[in-house]
Image: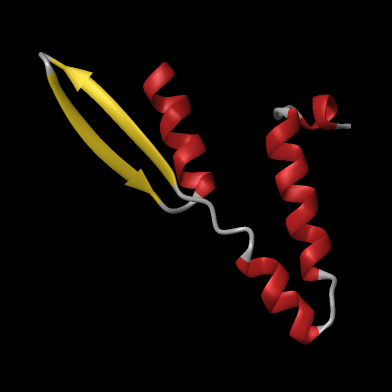
Amino acid sequence: MWRYAGVSYNRYAIEMAQILCKCLKDPFRDIALSRHSINIKENIFGKGDGHNKVLDNLDIAFEKSVQSNN
């Protein structure tokens, strides 16, 4: 299914886990959804200097990585 969706297995698994967590009842939903916060740190080195970029949203990070690869 994940190949048919056109995404990687990891991204598909994360999205399916988030959908499952949204189906839980109220007190458990908040706890489960809080576990899905993902921080991504990217270090870009150019001319000997490192530049840090921290992205808090996985969707934004994925879009930016696709744009930088093109």
Determine which quarter of the picture holds residue 20: bottom right
**Residue at 47%, 26% in the rendered image:** 66
**Residue at 35%, 33% in the rendered image:** 42
Q: Residue furthest bottom?
A: 27
Left or right, 1 with respect to 41, comes to right
- Where is residue 10? Give x, y as percent: 71, 34
Q: Residue furthest right?
A: 1
Left or right, 30 with respect to 28, comes to left
- Where is residue 27? Give x, y as percent: 75, 86
Classify the position of the C terminus by image quarter: top left
Left or right, 4 with respect to 35, comes to right
**Residue at 48%, 52% in the rendered image:** 57
| 24 versus 43 height, above or below | below
Determine which quarter of the picture holds residue 23: bottom right
Left or right, 55 with respect to 66, comes to left
| 67 versus 46 height, above or below | below
Classify the position of the N terminus by image quarter: top right
**Residue at 79%, 32% in the rendered image:** 5
Q: How many marks?
A: 0
Q: How is the image coloured?
A: secondary structure
- Where is residue 18? Give x, y as percent: 73, 58
